[in-house]
Image (spheres, rainbow, N blue to C red):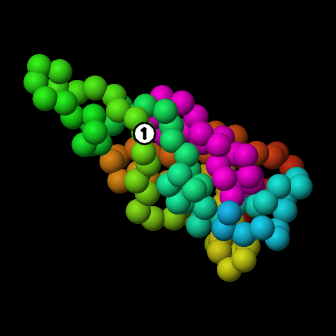
Amino acid sequence: MGICVCMGAMLQCTFGAAPATLVVNSQTTTLVSSKPMATIMDNKPMANIPTFGMCSCPGNPATIKPPPVGFAPAPCVPVIPAPWTPGSPTVLVSKYPALNNNSKLMCAYGGVIQIVNPGQFQTMVP
C-alpha cells in the first residue's frame, strides 16, 4: 500500500540536479489533507512537472557538446511521453487512477522521476 500524493509533493529525477514540486491540475474537487489529490494524469512537463535544474543525462541532446568538451549538463526540460505508472487502479479520482508514492514517471531522455515526499502522510491508497 502506498501513500496518497497531493499538490506540493517533492519529486526527483535521476539525472536532475535539484528536486521539483508537483503541481496538481488534473482535478480540483477531491482533496487530501486540504490539498488537491494527484492522479496519474498529472504528468505534463512544466504544467505539472517543473524543471529539475540542470540535466546530466547523456541521452539528452542538449547535453551533447562539440569536441573537445563532448558533454556538459544543460537546463532540464522534461520530456514525458506517458502517465505515471502504476498509480492506484482501484482508487479513481475524476476518472483517473490516484497517484501513490510508489509510482514512477519516465523522461524520454532516460531519467526516472520518483516521488520523494508525497505532500502528506495521513492517507494511504492501494
Q: Amino acid at mark 1?
A: Cys
Furthest toward the top, the residue is: 68
Task: From the viewer's perspective, tell me whether residue 109 is left or right of residue 15.
Answer: left
Residue 117, percent across and down?
A: 70, 40
Q: Residue 20's spot in the image, x, y percent?
A: 59, 39
For the point 79% across and 60% down, the residue is 36
Quarter of the image with the N terminus in it:
bottom right
Q: Nearer the viewer, residue 126 or 51?
A: 51
Q: Residue at x 65, y 74 (%)?
A: 96
Q: Which residue is located at x 66 percent, y 53 percent?
A: 23
The quadrant holding residue 99 is bottom right
Q: Residue at x 21, y 34 (%)?
A: 64
Q: Quarter of the image holding residue 59?
A: top left
Q: Is residue 75 above or below residue 72?
A: below
The magenta span reads 1-24
113 left or right of 62?
A: right
Residue 101 relative to residue 15: left or right: right
Task: Determine whether, in the image, residue 83 is placed left or right of residue 79.
Answer: right
Residue labelled with disc 1 = 76
> Badge 1 local density, few (<14 within 10 Å), some, or many (20+)?
many
Residue 123 appears in the figure:
no
The C terminus lies in which quarter of the figure? bottom right
